[in-house]
C-alpha cells in the first residue's frame, strides 16, 4: 500500500500536502498510482498530479496548478483514461478531504 511519506517526499511544492486522492492502476503484476495532492483541505488549489511506479521506486510530478480550480483533476483524469486505453485497469483507492471549488477563483494554470 502507499505511504503518505512517499507522496510527501516526492512533492516538489514547498508546502506539505493536506489532502489527496489516489487512483491505482494495474496491468499484470505492475502497479501505477496517479494522485492529486492538495495543499489545503477544502481548497482546489494549489495542487499537483503525481505519478508513482512503486516497483521502480519512482514518483514524478506530472502537472501543477496554483490558481486554476479543476486543472489537476482534469489532467489526472485524462492521464488515467490514457492508461486505461493502453490496457491498465484503474480504480480510485483513496480520497481524503477532497476540496470544494472556492467561490472567487481566478483562471490560471
Image: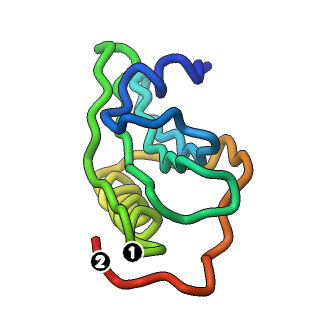
Q: Residues within 10 Å of mark 1 (few under 14, many from 20)?
A: some
Residue 70, percent across and down?
47, 73
- Residue for point 33% across, 13% down: 57
The residue lying toward the viewer, choosing from 63 and 79, is 63
Location of mark 1 (residue): 68
- Quarter holding the C terminus is bottom left
Tally the marks: 2
The residue lying toward the viewer, choosing from 24 and 95, is 95
- Mark 1 or 2, nearer chain start: 1
Outermost residue, right side: 97
- Residue for point 47% across, 25% down: 8
Residue 49, percent across and down?
38, 49
Answer left or right for 89 relative to 64.
right
In the rendered image of this protein, does residue 45 appear above or below residue 32?
below
- Quarter holding the N terminus is top right
Q: Which mark is residue 108?
A: 2
The residue lying toward the viewer, choosing from 35 and 5, is 5
The image quarter in which residue 59 lies: top left
In contact (CB < 8 Å): disc 1 and disc 2: yes
Answer left or right for 13 relative to 5.
left
Mark 1 and mark 2: Cα distance apart in space: 5 Å
Element on which disc 2 rests: loop
- Residue for point 49% across, 50% down: 36
Element on which disc 1 rests: loop
Residue 19, percent across and down?
63, 44
* Residue 2 visible within the image: no
- Residue for point 29% across, 20% down: 58
Amino acid at each position: 500500500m502507499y505511504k503518505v511519506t512517499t507522496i510527501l517526499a516526492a512533492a516538489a511544492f514547498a508546502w506539505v500536502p493536506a489532502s489527496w486522492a489516489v487512483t491505482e492502476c494495474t496491468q499484470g503484476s505492475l502497479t501505477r498510482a496517479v494522485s492529486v495532492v492538495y495543499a489545503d483541505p477544502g481548497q482546489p488549489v494549489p495542487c499537483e498530479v503525481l505519478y508513482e511506479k512503486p516497483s521502480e521506486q519512482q514518483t514524478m510530478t506530472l502537472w501543477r496548478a496554483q490558481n486554476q480550480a479543476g486543472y489537476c483533476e482534469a489532467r489526472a483524469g485524462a492521464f488515467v483514461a490514457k492508461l486505461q486505453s493502453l490496457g491498465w485497469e484503474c480504480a480510485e483507492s483513496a480520497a481524503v478531504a477532497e476540496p470544494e471549488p472556492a467561490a472567487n477563483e481566478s483562471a490560471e494554470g
